[in-house]
Amino acid sequence: MAGLTSQIKKCIEGKLEQGFDKFIIFPFGDIGMQVKRILNVSYGIQEAYVLDNHLCKYNLKIRELSYLEKIDCRDYCLILSSIDQNIYDSLKADVVKYLKNENIAEISGVSSSAGG
């Protein structure tokens, strides 16, 4: 998965260069867990929030996406941590209800890549 790791790093570095230093990870599946590890270990940054509409039922530290209504989203960059083409557009549509596009980090090249 070196390709995915380098795409996640490129995504994070792009937002760091834009001045973002507070990150939100959504959703928190396998990719989200990898994003968290890279953010924490490679860059020494602790994410501000982890959002996942399913896991929030089992872990009180994880919040549902609607939690964004309660914070000033201008201060944060949300890393859209999905590469599943079947749900990606739906996840992004849900996120843009709360954040402007410049506050959303997408793992470029991964969301639109076809298997092969």
Image: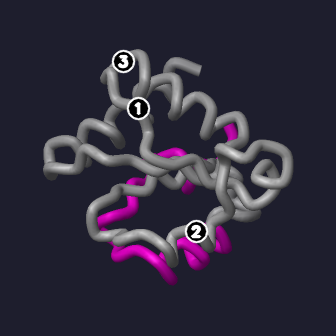
Q: Residue at x 52, y 23 (%)?
A: 37
Residue 100 falls left or right of residue 96: left
Q: How far apart in space, not on screen, are marks 2 and 3 (Cα)?
A: 27 Å
Residue 78 falls left or right of residue 80: left
Q: Of callouts 2 and 3, which one flags the residue occurring earlier in the amino acid sequence?
A: 3
| Up/down of 9 relative to 59, above or below | above
Q: Give the residue at mark 3.
A: 42
**Image location of residue 33, percent across then percent down:** 62, 32
Question: Label 2's element?
Answer: helix
| Up/down of 67 relative to 27, above or below | below
Amino acid type, label 3: Ser
Crowding near pointer 3: few (<14 within 10 Å), some, many (20+)?
A: few
Whether residue 109 appears in magenta in the rendering, the answer is yes
Crowding near pointer 2: few (<14 within 10 Å), some, many (20+)?
A: few
Q: Of callouts 1 and 2, which one flags the residue occurring earlier in the amino acid sequence?
A: 1
Q: Quadrant of the N terminus?
A: top right
**Coloring applied to the structure:** one colour
Q: In front of the other: label 1 or label 3? A: 1
Between 103 and 48, the one nearer to me in the picture: 48
Q: Quadrant of the C terminus?
A: top right
Residue 98 falls left or right of residue 22: right
Is the C-beta separation of discs 1 and 2 under 8 Å? no
Whether residue 14 appears in magenta in the rendering, the answer is no
Q: Give the residue at mark 2.
A: 67
Q: Magenta residues?
A: 89-116
Is the C-beta separation of discs 1 and 3 under 8 Å? no
Amino acid type, label 2: Tyr
Q: Give the residue at mark 1.
A: 46
**Image location of residue 88, percent across then percent down:** 64, 63
